Amino acid sequence: MIMKMKIMTHFCNCAVFALLSLAACTEIPGDKSKPEWKESASGVWEISVGKPEKLNLLSELGLHPKWDAINAMPKADLPVDRDEIRFEEVDGKTYIRFPLDKGEKIFGLGLNFKTVEQRGRILELHVDHYGGKDNGRTHAPVPFFVSSKGYGAFINSARYIKAYVGTGVRKDTKNPPEVQDRNTDPGWSAQPYSDNLEFLVPAEGVEVVLFAGQDMQDVVRRFNLFNGGGVLPPKWGLGFWHRVPTLFTDRQVQDEIAEFRKRGFPLTVIGLEPGWMSRAYPCTYEWDATRFPEPGKFVNDLLQKHIRTNLWFNPGVSPECEIRDAIEPYTASHTEWNGLIPDYRMPEARRIMLDHFKKHQLDLGVSGYKMDENDGYDNWLWPDVATFPSGTPAEQMRQIYGSLMQRMTTDLYHEKNQRTYGLVRAGNAGTSSFPYVIYNDYYNHRDFITALINSSFIGVLWTPEVRASKTSEEWLRRMQTVCFSPVAMLDAWADGTKPWSFPDVEKQVNEISLLRMRLIPYLYTAFAGYAFEGTPPMRAMNLEPGYAADEQIEKGKLDGTENPYAMAVKREVKDQFMVGENLLVAPLFAGETERKVILPQGRWYDFYTGKLAGEGEVITVSPGLDRIPVYVKDGGIVPLCPPITELDGTKLPLEIRHYGSKPGTFRLYDDDGETYNYEKGEYTYLTITVDVAPDGSKQGKVSVPEGREIWSYNGEYTFRYMTE
Ligand code: GAL
């Protein structure tokens, strides 16, 4: 039975909900429901329909939407008629329908690994370890989509939401697809045009937020700003990370660091895997006295070397953990690998665990965490029948558990006024401002890059971390891409690999890891843009104005065994992305010697040589093994610091590169790199400009607002005009 909801009211900025009533009446075919949307900021509309649950994806996260930044954005109208977004109650659940035009593209809807454009897919959004299929089960199944029409919608429910992205065809559609005869028409399609994007939320009501934008990038920016903006990592987080084998001792870690230094490889963070703990899994969260007899001294020794310590843990509390009895009343009915699972919705659970973390990690100088295995699979994590003492249903807990862990550990560091940056395997909507990057065990290089691209639509960060490789070619290709990602990390927990593990490419790996260090000023500025303006630092080409996707849909041929329903195959571009304002990165994968690169409108220049690469066209490049293709926009400025191997706080000179023939401006962000003082306005922008005279000669200058502190640079600025 289908019933129509009456929408009584909506919610406001501060996310205080009015009490809603869901009045069911018999369906009146063709009757228009008139949801009332409220514009809560420029280009943001919110609605609350039916009886939304109090617990949703954002309710537990203490977020502060950046309304001022949203209102400062260029005005944008909604390109869809809000009345065409329909809400109904179906079988006690909430059915939402968005109109879909022919040719409209839909992006987002979770951290997908194989596809970028979601039209034609059916997803059930469910936090899980990615299992090899884009079916909705993933590490960050964010229920937010961006449409190529220039708007996006966020379905704020912590339930397993089903999404039918242009698959269902309603008989009352105003845009009926052509009826074809499969018997005789070879062009018959198993996917007739559907003008619907349909969601089924297993709850009696839901909040929906719409975001408009002059282009898709603006839509995503509004979504991120609504969630409090993006994270600004500490500067050391943008250096090079190395996670050592799980059973390494303090001595072995020190030796490994010495080897990094000896070989001239950069290192800013050491990650310790489960073996740092006295027991794991399940976890004690306490140091192992044999491998790390003096943990405080160990962490401090590393700090003296300007290396931060990041510690692995997962949710399950060991029977041997010193707070086991204290936490037990606040844990779930089910265990993870014999570990008690704290109910992080309970203040008592948070307090007990945080005191424990403080005592054993924070007070010793540990810089952050890798929070593992809070995603799935269902046979590790709790089943949906589990109960939690806070009364939170297992399904909702699954959808927000990673987000809860992110929030609570972020708060811990925030209280100390010390920024952290770490890794996590689960997140969801609302986590963009938390200092965590998602990773997993899936390890398909190509798909890792697709995930990197997709992360930019949904307000999360992803790293295509490097673990091992079959060949030196694969090793180098993976190293090249990870150095253009949110965390440049080698995760040698199982394989004991080192950056120099493949001697024949040691030099090239060294070069790319040093280039990562050189890019820190540029990357840090990109992250400031994420924090203050919501712009994803690494992002899909589709979010780039002037980019025309070279997508092809190949008509499927009817075949009795291979393709009995003649399904079409979509070929899309999912292997190149933008980094910061000016760089376009086009990775190569093992086995490839050349590739196509789609250059958006305008002229683009080779990052390494400054030579013109092309202009709004598809080019084919064969750069050799040593280099990952990187292109710079016309007029693009890229400030580089020296190829340092550590960040020791010394003020650095800059080599400022300018590309192409247009004048350029770059606002270089700077602050203390470590604390949250920037939230109180303690930051500066250095304005770099390059003027081009009528005779083509270039003149660069750096200006600093008077009286403002410069934390990172020493005033020695050398301009390099890369394009002659
Ligand atoms: C995996 C995780 C790895 C590593 C390992 C340690 O699940 O993804 O990166 O941390 O656990 O046991």
Image (cartoon, helix red, strand yellow):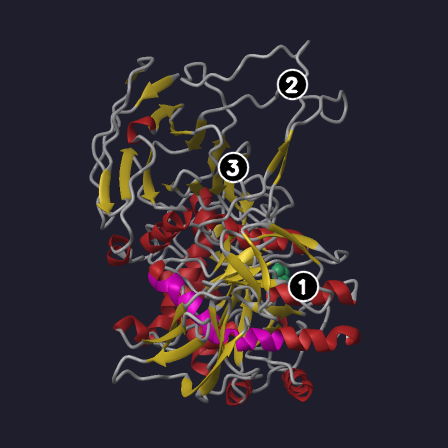
* Mark in front: 1 vs 2: 2
Type of amino acid at the residue the image marks with label 2: Gly
The x and y percentages for residue 124 are: 52, 37
Marking on residue 478: 1
Q: CA distance from mark 3 to mark 1?
A: 31 Å
Between the C-alphas of marks 1 and 2, the distance is 42 Å
Residue drawn at 54 percent across, 51 percent down:
616
Q: Is residue 363 magenta?
A: no
Q: Nearer the viewer, residue 713 or 697?
A: 697
Check disc 1 and report its element: helix, strand or loop. helix
Which amino acid type is shown beneath numbered disc 3?
Glu
> Which is in the foreground here, disc 3 or disc 1?
1
Q: Which residues are magenta?
A: 513-532
Q: Locate the C terminus and report the quarter of the image it occupies.
A: bottom right
Is the CB of the residue bearing disc 2 within 8 angstroms of ligand 1? no
Q: Residues within 10 Å of mark 2 (few under 14, many from 20)?
A: some
Q: Earlier in the sequence, mark 1 or mark 2?
A: 2
The residue labelled by disc 3 is 124
Count of numbered labels shown in the rendering: 3
The location of residue 335, given as percent across then percent down, is 54, 53
Q: CA separation, marks 2 and 3? A: 30 Å
Residue sitting at x 52%, y 71% = 285
Q: Are marks 1 and 2 in contact (CB under 8 Å)?
A: no
Q: Is residue 525 magenta?
A: yes
Front in this rendered view, residue 163 or 223? 223
Q: Can you tell which mark lies on residue 187?
A: 2
